[in-house]
Amino acid sequence: MRTQLSGVLWIHSMPGPLQPHITWALARLSMPDGTKPGRDIWRATDQDATLCAEVPFTASADTIATLVDNLARWPRLYFELAQDPAVDDDGYAIDGMRYCHTPQLGTFAGQTDAAGNIVVNEDALRSIMARGGDIEGALDAAIGGPWDRVLEPMRMMTAGYAPEECFTTSKPAGPDSASGNSTAGNADLGGVEAANVLKLYPRRAAM
């Protein structure tokens, strides 16, 4: 049996038309109570009628990696996923991981310690020093600095909300067969799938 890992996925921002597709992708995960993420996880942000969500989960390492790859294929989707460190059934340690994605930068993947801090291993540090040049910039990239600067303004919106009223989104968008991207990234956001709208309710930070 594959070791089940715990973690949290934060969808910081995505267009409403992607909701049914991303909800379907999240069905790979199980929430701590054993249920699957549903439409009630979605929250309206105050940014251009986009949606966000915070999803605690359990899943295998392979499932997590596949989910990150699938989510990264959709346009205008900003997300982070934190996988907690664990010990497998044979007593071997499993590293924690953090994945960060923005459409402009692509996907960052970094190993984390028990506190969630990015860990840069010895080989990576030696490689950075051997290349020379902009060492400060290389170290910043190695710890996900460029992704942090884009996502930080979104994190508090995603961190905690309370239900307020119902909200509707537009028709589902299908991925482009050639590129894997949605063909409705700029679609009008009025209308088909229902989601819960939530207002800001301070609870805990996203990272």
Image: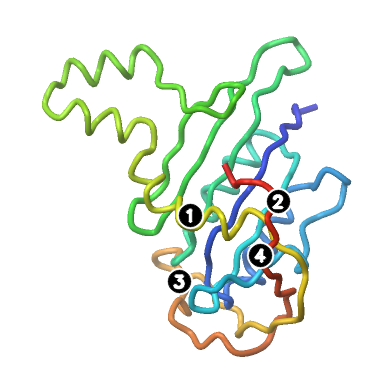
Q: Earlier in the sequence, mark 4 or mark 3?
A: 3
At horizontal 59% and vertical 38% (from top left) the residue drawn is: 82
Q: Earlier in the sequence, mark 1 or mark 3?
A: 1
State yes or no: discs 1 and 3 in contact (Cβ < 8 Å): no
Q: Residue furthest front?
A: 202
Mark 1 to mark 4 CA distance (whole Å): 26 Å
Q: What residue is disc 1 on?
A: 72
**SS at mark 4 in the image:** strand
Residue at image coords 23%, 21%: 128
Structural distance between the alpha carbons of marks 4 and 3: 34 Å
- The answer to which of marks 2 and 3 sits earlier in the sequence is 3
Instruction: Please report whichever mark, 2 or 1, sits nearer to the chain's N-terminal start.
Output: 1
Mark number displayed over residue 200: 4
Disc 3 marks which residue?
176
Q: CA distance from mark 2 to mark 3?
A: 37 Å
- The quadrant of the rendering that contains the C terminus is top right
Residue 142 to residue 30: above or below: above
Q: Secondary structure at mark 3?
A: loop
Residues under numbered marks 4 and 3 in contact, where contact means CB atoms less than 8 Å apart: no
Residue 72, given in percent of the width and then of the height, sits at 48, 54
**Residue indicated by mark 2:** 203
Front of the two marks 2 and 3 = 2
First in sequence: mark 1 or mark 4? 1
Inspect the image, locate mark 2, and give the three-letter code of the amino acid beneath it: Arg
Please identify, in this view, whether the residue under mark 1 or under mark 3 is nearer the observer: 1
Q: Which one is in front, 60 or 39?
A: 39
